[in-house]
Image: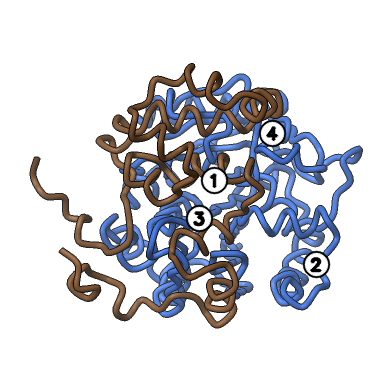
Amino acid sequence: MADKEYDDIPGTFVFDADRSREGYNLNQFCISLRLQVNRDAFNADENAYLDAYPMTAEQREAVVKRDWNLLLELGGNIYYTAKFAANEGINFQNLAGKMTGMGVEAYREMMLNGGRPIDGNRTKSEWKED
Amino acid sequence: MARVTAGVGCSHVPAIGAAMDTGITQEPYWKPIFEGFKKSREWMKDQKPDVIFLVYNDHCTAFDASCIPTFALGCAAEFKPADEGWGPRPVPVVKNHQKLASHIAQSLILDEFDLTIMNEMEVDHGLTVPLSVMYGDVGQDEDWPALVIPLCVNVVQYPPPTGNRCYNLGKAVRRAIDTFDEDLNVMIFGTGGMSHQLQYKRAGLINKEWDTKFLDLMTKDPVAASQITHLEYLRETGSEGIEMVMWLIMRGALDEDVTEIYRHYHVPASNTAVGHIILENKV
């Protein structure tokens, strides 16, 4: 597949059609947790609940491990995974604290100080990533 | 005839709604955000719009990954606030001006904007938070002071419609409203943004300089704003900053020459730069 023009933005997944296709069952699982009746069923018997969503073994393991970054790497989208995180008692800001590896307190402090600056965060070369 | 009098640009951060719903707006973290809407609430009381055409994005609430319309117009009689995972917001049911909504749907489709028509739909924070910040607390058993026509835009799965397409859609919405034979004061809200990234290792990105330039262009040069590329939004304003294409629908529905009445900008609300602007058509 040809390189995509947005692939050199660091620390970012652009949720395009390819990712949407790859993550479809994972994302549909996550969004099902919007409803209390489904949260109750998931919380009561996680394995049985996950059997209804034919995701890959890798995706399922990322769900079981609550590996928030791996979920995104495997086609998850933040608006979907955030519903899963909410079921774990994690809000958007604290989820960001985890995904960035900064921790909740340091992340909150960065936001209070104006957020992550754009300078140095435009391209992968600035992050020394491929 | 119906007339478009003004446009409002406004972020729709869910935590802002939660702060109102839990009564913590006077806490130091939230106070400067809500202070910035004081003047806007007074202005809304003076203007008394009959109808608000409200452009927002659904956050996997009415639409999950199984169905992703690029533009979906709310034509139902009313729209209930949705349960987004923590119970519905304690705000009124949103009531439509159904006749105007169906007139707009018909006009837009004949104008070659092929919309999805929603005759049943729940609405999420993307729609209710802008109403809350602009009107203040409105009890669940009261009515919103205006009727609301929702327009959902896909900005979750890439690519959203281009800024240029949104700007031209705004112009078509204006043509539709201008030909509706009822004396109505109509406002357009464009919501979402400003710079923010919610996901992965670059989460927390804020670009105040870019946001300020965007607000300037909203007032002075909307055509230039309509030409901003998706790549620029993604890189410069964060992966979720691309929501700002929705402001261009609002801007397209206004005259080219507008008066900037007010603006407000604050960092942070949760992960996001809160931006707000009020633009009036010249009489």
Relative to the observer, which residue lies in front, B184 or B267?
B267
Q: According to the image, label 3 marks what residue?
A: B254
- Please name which of the two marks, 3 or 4, marks the residue nearer to the observer: 4
Query: Which chain contains the residue that carries disc 3?
Result: B
What's the CA distance linking mark 3 and mark 2? 32 Å
> Looking at the picture, does residue B158 appear above or below residue B229?
above
Going from N to C along the chain, the mark reached first, 3 or 2, is 2
What's the CA distance linking mark 2 and mark 1? 24 Å
Numbered mark located on residue B25 in the image: 2
Relative to the observer, which residue lies in front, A90 or B61?
A90
Q: Residue at left 50%, top 55%?
A: B254
The answer to the question of whether label 1 and label 3 lie on touching residues, with beta carbons closer than 8 A, is no
What's the CA distance linking mark 3 and mark 4? 30 Å
Going from N to C along the chain, the mark reached first, 2 or 4, is 2
Q: According to the image, label 4 marks what residue?
A: B82
Residue B228 seen in render: yes
- Please name which of the two marks, 4 or 1, marks the residue nearer to the observer: 1
Numbered mark located on residue B66 in the image: none
> Looking at the picture, does residue A10 appear above or below residue B172?
below
What's the CA distance linking mark 2 and mark 4? 22 Å
The chain assigned the colour blue in the figure is B
- Please name which of the two marks, 2 or 1, marks the residue nearer to the observer: 1
Q: According to the image, label 1 marks what residue?
A: A82
